[in-house]
Image (tube, rainbow, N blue to C red):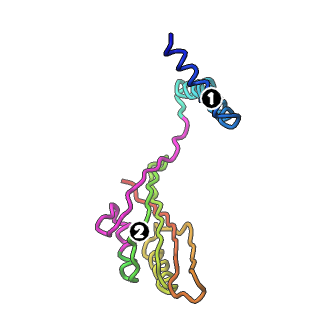
Amino acid sequence: MRPMKHTLTLLNFQIARLRWPGMLGMVLIVLALLVDVTQIKPLEAALEAAGQRPAPQARTTRLSTLKQPAAAPYPDLEKLFAVAEQVDINLSQGQYRLENLADGSRRLHIDLPIQADYPSARHFLAQALSEMPDLSLAHLQLSRERIDDAVLSVHMQFILTLKKG
């Protein structure tokens, strides 16, 4: 009986430490779980029993940061590395995220931070988009530390639509 009393005292102490923000958070978590169990799960079960499934959401998979063109798992991505090499831009850093869509197609989201002068960055962007029809530019940000700096910090976000298969 002694350990139970100690456990309850400890639990009471921890709950008192949470104060009102922590208690509110706990109440919201419990409410979210109750809504999931009492509302969402039965609706999903009813849809599945009726033979209708909700549309699958796009699943995303993280790819590791690619360091060299030889490590590229997709031939289209190797083209992008080749264009960068032609323009003398180093793509040593980047983040790549694969998105599987409901229709079976895939998109590769590419985030590339580079350091280059403006003509090189512009030439890389123009050449990549012209040589790769499945590549689209989602975001472009140019910045530099000082107005007289020749080298820009360029952040490019591309979306590469991959062929099925």
Q: In the rendered structure, which segment of residues is drawn in magenta?
A: 54-81
Q: Nearer the viewer, residue 80 or 71?
A: 71
Instruction: Say above or below: 82 vs 26.
Output: below
Residue denoted by label 2: 93
User: Residue at 46% across / 64% down in the picture?
Assistant: 110
Categorize mark 1 by other alpha carbons within 10 Å: few (<14), some (14-19), many (20+): some
**Is residue 41 left or right of 100 when viewed as pictured?**
right
Instruction: Say above or below: 117 vs 133.
Output: below
1 or 2: tag closer to the N-terminus: 1
Which quadrant holds residue 13?
top right
Hey, which residue is sitting farthest top in the picture?
1
User: Residue at 52% across / 77% down in the picture?
Assistant: 153
**Is residue 93 left or right of 23 when viewed as pictured?**
left
Q: Which of label 1 and label 2 is nearer to you?
A: 1
Amino acid type indicated by mark 1:
Ile
**Residue 23 locus on image (x, y percent):** 67, 32
Distance of mark 1 from mark 2, alpha carbons?
45 Å
Residue denoted by label 1: 15
Q: Nearer the viewer, residue 91 or 164?
A: 91
User: Residue at 30% across / 64% down in the picture?
Assistant: 71
Instruction: Say above or below: 77 vs 149.
Output: above
Q: Nearer the viewer, residue 54 or 124?
A: 124
Amino acid type indicated by mark 2:
Gln
Does the magenta-highlighted stretch encompass residue 87? no
**Residue 33, disc:** none
Which quadrant holds residue 26?
top right
**Residue 83 locus on image (x, y percent):** 39, 77
Element at badge 2?
loop
**Residue 49 locus on image (x, y percent):** 53, 24
**Residue 124 locus on image (x, y percent):** 45, 79
Element at badge 1?
helix
